Image (spheres, rainbow, N blue to C red):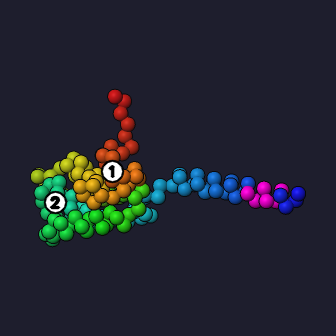
Amino acid sequence: MASTRSSSYILLSAAVLLSVLAATAAAANWCEPGLVIPLNPLPSCRTYMVRRACGVSIGPVVPLPVLKERCCSELEKIVPYCRCSALRTALDSMMTGYEMRPTCSWGGLLEFAPTLVSEAECNLRTIHGRPFCYALGAEGTTTSD
């Protein structure tokens, strides 16, 4: 009887510990830059986005198919759960260090960036379980309409 009670206590303790760990993990945002996402993420994707969305080149001119391949490789190295966040982080880093040309707009980049995970581009699963990201400019917003 004592061993049954001891086994029950151990199982109950393990269940409580797992619940606490799960709650702690859910509360933490693992997709923060510096954890799962590099601090300066997706450099090839930033260049590819500007070339595709704006028709201009930043940095050395690399053929578009090569640039796309590099971008997809960088995105693939990021866990699916954080790919959409990594794209948003890459755009945010561009906003502070990139002078927008008249032929380009942030709106165009915000529209194009989420398509990088799509079947037509890199075909990579995301947090949504398929190659899809919500509009990056709409994260964390609500509408009253």
Split into 4 quadrants, where in the image is the N terminus? bottom right
Closer to the camera in the image, 22 or 140: 22
- Quadrant of the rendered structure where residue 52 is? bottom left
In the rendered image, the vertical position of residue 116 relative to residue 66, given as above or below: above
> Can residue 111 be seen from the camera position used here?
yes
Q: Which mark is residue 51?
A: 2
- Quadrant of the rendered structure where residue 2 is? bottom right
Q: Can you give x and y, in whole percent of width and height, for residue 126 in the image?
A: 38, 55
- Tag 1 residue: 132
Magenta residue span: 5-11
Split into 4 quadrants, where in the image is the C terminus? top left
Q: Can you give x and y, in whole percent of width and height, for residue 30 in the image?
A: 47, 58
**Residue 40 forms part of the magenta stretch:** no
Identify the residue at image location x=35%, y=33%.
143
Answer few, some or many: residues within 10 Å of disc 1's Cα (few below 14, many 20 plus, some between 14 and 19): many
Q: Which mark is residue 80?
A: none
> What amino acid does circle 1 point to?
Phe
In the drawing, does residue 12 fall left or right of residue 122? Answer: right
